[in-house]
Image: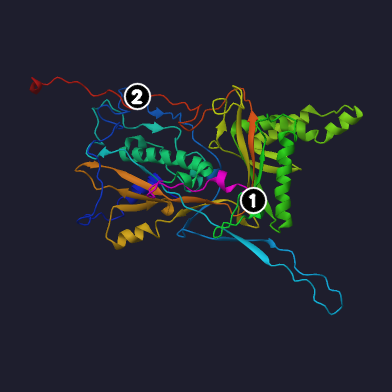
Amino acid sequence: MTGVLTQLLAELSQYERVTPVQGQRHTTPAGTPVGPYMHGPNGLWSMTGIERNIISTRVQPVGLAGAIPSRGSTTLNPLFPYLTGFLPGTGNNPTGVCDDFPVAGPMKNCLQTADFGRYGRMTREIDITFPGRTINRSEFMDLTVVNDPLMAPGINGNGILQPNVGGANLNQELLMRFVEVGIEFQNLLSRQLYTGNPANNTSGGGYKEFPGLDLLIGTNKKDALTGQACPSLNSLIMDYQYRMVNDTSSFGDVVNVLTYMYRILRSNASTMELMPATWSIVMKEELFYEITRVWPCSYFTYGCASVRDSSFQNINADAGDMIQLRDAMRNGRYLIIDGQQIPVIIDDAIFEASSTTTNRLTAGRYASDIYIIPNTVKGMSGLYWEYIDYQKTAITTAAQGNIGSYYWTDGGRYLWHAKPPKNFCAQWLAVIEPRIILPFPHLTAKLRNVAYQPLIHTRDPFPTDSYFVNGGVTSRLTAPSLFADYKG
């Protein structure tokens, strides 16, 4: 599927621009273009003698958001039905052979729904007469980005964002403004996948959040129409209570807990006739490496502690075999449970607690949640995106109203609007209305507050995170101060 930025530029010429209807209310750019520009005086890449290859150091978020499918929709309030069980029969057993038997109990059901969010961003304002200018022949126009800052196999994998910045595109001023919007969406939506909460919606509906996984994976499921509790749809939630991954106190180490949680989900699927089903385990990268450090030892000696303690026997385990298992899990990105390789998805967007956010952790230790997500259940998607398809809604309306300043990209996921220009000052804005559908919450689990202590923490991709590393400047003073006879 063509990316949001490259497709956008190709589509700019496809939609007829018309004069806005008289009396139509609109906002125009402020009339103050916002730099920096890529080239020209004070341009970001206009320094004399700059090398051709440009290396990006942006850490790109990866995770679950790009690993699940997405599909368009125009249904605002879907109702997903569940058969939740049968009540016990009523009546007494008969006394005589011709007496009535008890009446069988009735069937029960539960309805669930899903809400769209609404997110938007705007480009920086641009003076459309400025791009394309250079200072003089000293300015190079063959710059190439070696490693694309917006093409990681994370949230962009399934059409949420798919831009392409490579090649000599640093020479395309407008394209880079859309790249900035794309990065904003990438950071925003990958986090909202977990933390989205309609309680944060604005009163007028301009900004709306869809319910994220931290709400969908829960134990308070209710009927969408009556509010009646539906506990058979509850997810499996356990709290590790900020214990370290190798802590064997209480209900066992993390290997024991995750093993039992996975068994419960498989049991649910099997006894509910929902097999075949597959799952993935989702966690932070630091947590994955710390878990795989202790997993082989625990897995090879699982259940041996009681034998050893009761009979004073020594346990021998082959260190080579444990190292081989550890490396295989790390290289293959999986955990082995009951002989099955369960895929692991590394996700940067999962919230990570530290000593600065909770007094349950000491300096150098961190804690985050682990999710067990159904991939497929009887051939159906266990988790997927839905988005308002603007090809079928907004664009059709705009065409009927002869309004030519709107266009969609990415298969209808994004709706773009070119603001009415203020003379030569222009600005664009985009909106997306996505939501997450979790059809099988009762086949989903979360292990909360698992603590770990990596020797060195990896860089964070999100600007608000503790280990985000950025730096650099947003403008260059390259405007020449030239003497001329007409300057006096």
Residue 50 bears which disc, if any? 2
Colouring of the image = rainbow
Per the picture, the main secondary structure of the magenta-coloured stretch is loop
- Residue at 41% over, 33% down: 145
Q: Position of residue 203 (x, y in %)?
A: 39, 48
Residue 234 bears which disc, if any? 1
Q: Quadrant of residue 297?
A: top right
In front: mark 1 or mark 2?
1
Q: Position of residue 29 (x, y in %)?
A: 25, 42
Left or right position of 81 against 149: right
Q: Position of residue 143 (x, y in %)?
A: 36, 31
Asked if the magenta segment contains residue 212, the reply would be yes
The residue segment tinted magenta is 202-219
Q: Upstream in the sequence, badge 1 or badge 2?
A: 2
Mark 1: which amino acid?
Answer: Asn
Q: Secondary structure at mark 2?
A: loop
Q: Is residue 136 above or below residue 130?
A: above
Q: Secondary structure at mark 1?
A: loop
Left or right position of 258 against 217: right
Left or right position of 246 against 230: right
Q: Quadrant of residue 213?
A: top right
Asked if the magenta segment contains residue 47, the reply would be no
Alpha-carbon span between mark 1 and mark 2: 58 Å
Q: Is residue 67 visible?
A: no
**Label total for image:** 2
Q: Residues within 10 Å of mark 2 (few under 14, many from 20)?
A: few
Q: Position of residue 225 (x, y in %)?
A: 54, 60
Mark 2: which amino acid?
Answer: Ile
Q: Is residue 348 above or below residue 442?
A: above
